Image (tube, helix red, strand yellow):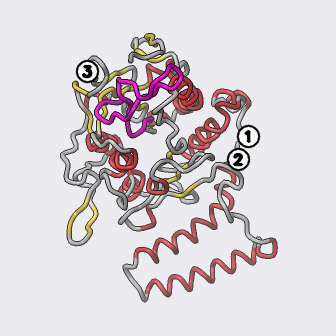
Amino acid sequence: MGSPFAFQRHGQCGMELSELLPHLAEVVDEITVIRSMRTGVNNHVQSIHALNAGRITAGHPALGSWLCYALGSEAQNLPAFVALPDPLSLPVGGVDHWANGWLPSLFQGTVVRPKEPRILNLDPPAHMRGEPQEKLLKYLDELNRDHLAQHAGELDLEARIATYGLAAQMQTAAKEALDLSKETAATKAMYGMDTPATAEYGTRCLIARRLVERGVRFVQVFTSNQFWDHHNTLSARLPEACKKTDKPSAALVKDLKQRGLLDSTVVMWGGEMGRLPVIQNGGTDKIGRDHNTYGFSSWLAGGGVKGGNVHGATDDVGHQAVEKVVMHHDLHATLLHLFGLDAKKLVYARNGQEQNLLDGKEGTVVTDILR
C-alpha cells in the first residue's frame, strides 16, 4: 500500500516531506533526515532499549546517563538529565528511558511531571521555611559528610547526599525554570499552546527549551505508550499523531535558533521503528501497518549537524534500508562525537570489565551528516 498522503519538496534544499508535517517543512534547511535507520529488533521494548541504551535488554544506562557521566552538569541548581513524560502514560519501556542502570545513581534522570506540581515536594512546610530549613540542611549535610567519610567509595551514598543539596537549590531554580508565565504570547503560539491538539506537547517542548537554556545537559520529551503503533486505522491515527508533535517540534528548532542556542544543542526526533510497506488488517477504515525496524527515519538538527540534508535510503517500497545504513550503535557513536566524546573510550569498569554504550559493536561515526 502506497502512502495515502501527498509528499512535496520544501526549503532551499528541496527535501521531500509528507503533507502531515507542514511545520517541519518550514525548518527543513536546519535538519538532517536519516532515512536509513535500522535496529533489526522487531519488538517495541527491545528496539527502544537498543536505541536508548545500546542493548536490547533492560537494566543498562540510558543515553542521557552516559552523557552526564561523561560531561557532568552545566547547571548547579538543576538536574543534569530531565525526562518529560506524556500525561496519558509512560512511554513503552517505562522508567528505563531515564534509568542509570549500573552507572552510579547520580546519573539517573529526574522526572518532571506533565501536570502541576511538576516536581513533587519542592516546598517545605510553612514552619520550616527560611532560616529553620537552612539550619536543618546544614546540620544534615554535616552528618552526611561524617557518615560518608566512614564509608568511602559508596557511590549510592554519595549520590543521595548530592541529591539533598540539589533539591534545596531546586526549590528556587526549578520553579523559575518551569514557570512559563513570562513567555510571550507569540512564543506560546509558536509552540501551539493556544490550540488543544498541540497545547500539551507544545508546553513540554517549551519547558525543554527553558531547561536547556539554563544548563540542563540532556532532556527527553516523550509521547505516550504505543502512540505511534498504528496496526489499524492508520488513516485517522497517523494524522492525529503528527498534528500533536509537528508544530511544537519545529518550534523548538526555530526557538533555539533565534536564541543562538541551536549550534550548541543537538535536537533529535525519532522512535524505535517505522512501519511495513504492506497493509495489516482489512477494510478501508481499519487498515494499518505492522512493525518495521529494518528501514525507518529520524531527524536531527543543530550541534554540528548539517542542515537541509537527507542521509541514506530504503529500497523502492520502503521495507529495508539499503543505502548508507545507520544502526543504533552508529547513531550513538555520532551523537557522542558531537559532544566531543569517543564512544569506544567512554567506559565504565563493571565486574572487572570495561563497559560502554556500544556494547561491543563497532559504532561508526556518520560523518556525512556532520558540518
- In the rendered image, the quadrant that contains the C terminus is top left
**Which residue bears the numbered disc 1?**
182
Residue 257 seen in render:
no
Residue 153 in the image, given as x and y percentages of width and height: 37, 79
Residue 285 seen in render:
yes
Residue at x 31%, y 29% (from the top left corner): 369
Q: In which quarter of the image is residue 270?
A: top left
Q: Does the magenta stretch include residue 287?
A: yes
Q: What element carries label 3?
A: loop
**Which residue bears the numbered disc 3?**
315
Q: In this view, does 332 lie above or below 27?
A: below
Residue at x 70%, y 47% (from the top left corner): 179
Q: Quadrant of residue 163?
A: bottom right
Which residue type carries mark 3? Asp
Of residue 295 and residue 199, the one placed in the foreground of this image is 295
Q: In this view, does 195 lie above or below 130?
A: above
Q: Give the range drawn in magenta.
A: 269-296
Residue 179, label in figure:
2
Residue 190 in the image, given as x and y percentages of width and height: 64, 27
